[in-house]
Amino acid sequence: MAKGAIVIDIERCKGCGVCIPACPNKVIALAKKVNKKGYNYLEVQNDNCIGCANCAIVCPDGVITVYRAK
Amino acid sequence: MNREDIIKPENLVYRRTPVLTENIMHYCPGCGHGTAHRLVAEVIEEMGIQEKTIGIAPVGCSVLAYNYFEVDMQEAAHGRAPALATAVKRLKPDFFVFSYQGDGDLAAIGTGETIHACNRGENITMIFINNGIYGMTGGQMAPTTLEDMKTSTSPYGREVQSMGNPLKITELLAQLPGTCYVTRQAVYTPALVRKCKRAIRQAFENQKENKGVSFVEIVSNCNSGWKMTPTASNQWLEDNMLPFYPLGDIKVSK
Ligand SMILES: Cc1ncc(C[n+]2csc(CCOP(=O)(O)OP(=O)(O)O)c2C)c(N)n1
Ligand code: SF4
Ligand code: SF4
Ligand code: SF4
């Protein structure tokens, strides 16, 4: 069961993908759609987030906010 | 548990630090400059020194760093950040002063300022982004460019005989009596990011004790200059940069 959740600031995302290999649970992927700047932004693809914040701390653009239930 | 029950203020574990401005950084997608900025800002937030910190911006891709840090910043002429940091720190010894520079700035045009600030032992924190190339101006060869590495001015690769050896400026600075803490870090995996942040924290804490220069090199990618995708550039960094620029502390004075 999911204990973590992330919120993605879509317009800030540059679709670089460096956060994707940092996720232990393959939670995140680039969307087929693009944001206003034309980048394929990051999206959540399943409920397996554990709130470890790995994705957020390697993101150069501070796109991701992380929550974890106690 | 569903998403709505998890996303509550009391469950927050990570958010973008308010010591960065809201501006979207101009760096290329996946560039390590952004991560390096964030770690410096997080350390300033955690130490509670936002009102007492002054940063010096370089010339290079991070020339606009002052648009991103929510602290007082001063722009330096190309390579002169350590000289300006010296002046600021001497005028305001109670402030935390950091310089932020690329390898062309710190290890080419500014070599003199770098070496003498480190030799004098100014009580400052120097952040050094080594991506082995001049990013801003179109990927020219830098002193730090690896042997055989292709750049726009070494299109067949850096040939040491005619173009000289890559410069390990960080090891050189560790030899100088004025440096108290010299370390090499990277920011492309979560574990390395955590380690790098601890190093930056140490480099700022040292200013409280008037110990001299604390120098943090961050081996970083320049995916545009290297002409790779961001994830491929991080792999290239690991396979090619790190064998020549090994990570870890080089000098830690008591
Ligand atoms: C006096 C002077 N000489 C040359 C330049 C051109 N110039 C601008 S940035 C730069 C090098 C930047 O490389 P680096 O410090 O490695 O930073 P990066 O862009 O890779 O982050 C050069 C040569 C300049 N702006 N001023
Ligand atoms: S917080 Fe951890 S588990 Fe959740 S998406 Fe990010 S890296 Fe994956
Ligand atoms: S969230 Fe950050 S690291 Fe991930 S793709 Fe977007 S900009 Fe890149
Ligand atoms: S040119 Fe290189 S160093 Fe400059 S922002 Fe782009 S990736 Fe980063």
Image: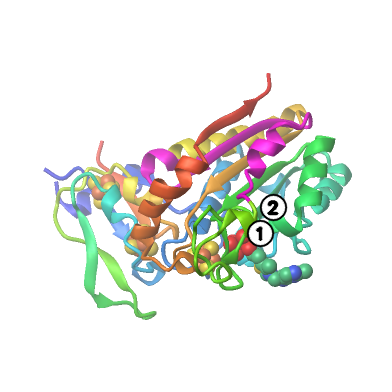
Instruction: Name the residue at 30% across, 69% down.
Output: A41
Residue on which disc 2 sits: B107
Front-lying residue, B197 or A53: B197
The chain to which mark 1 is attached is B
Q: Name the residue furthest left.
A: A1
Judge from the rendering whether residue B82 lies leftward or rightward of residue B149; answer left or right: right
Residue nearest the observer in this picture, B131 or B99: B131
Q: Position of residue B253 (x, y in %)?
A: 68, 22
Q: Is mark 2 within 8 Å of ligand 1?
A: yes
**Mark 1 vs 2: CB contact within 8 A:** yes
Looking at this view, name the residue that lies furthest to the top.
B254
**Is residue B171 highlighted in magenta?**
yes
Q: Which residue is mark 1?
A: B104
Mark 1 → mark 2, Cα distance in angstroms: 6 Å
| Colouring | rainbow
Residue B7 showing in the rendered view: no
Judged left or right of residue B179, residue B127 is left
The verdict on label 1 being within 8 Å of ligand 1 is yes
Please, what is the three-letter code of the amino acid marked with disc 1? Gly
Which residue is nearer to you in this view: B230 or B94? B230
Visible residue check, residue A55: yes
The answer to whether residue B172 is left or right of residue A59 is right
Q: Is residue B129 left or right of residue B126?
A: left
Q: Is residue B116 above or below residue B58?
A: above
Report the magenta residues as a range: B165-193
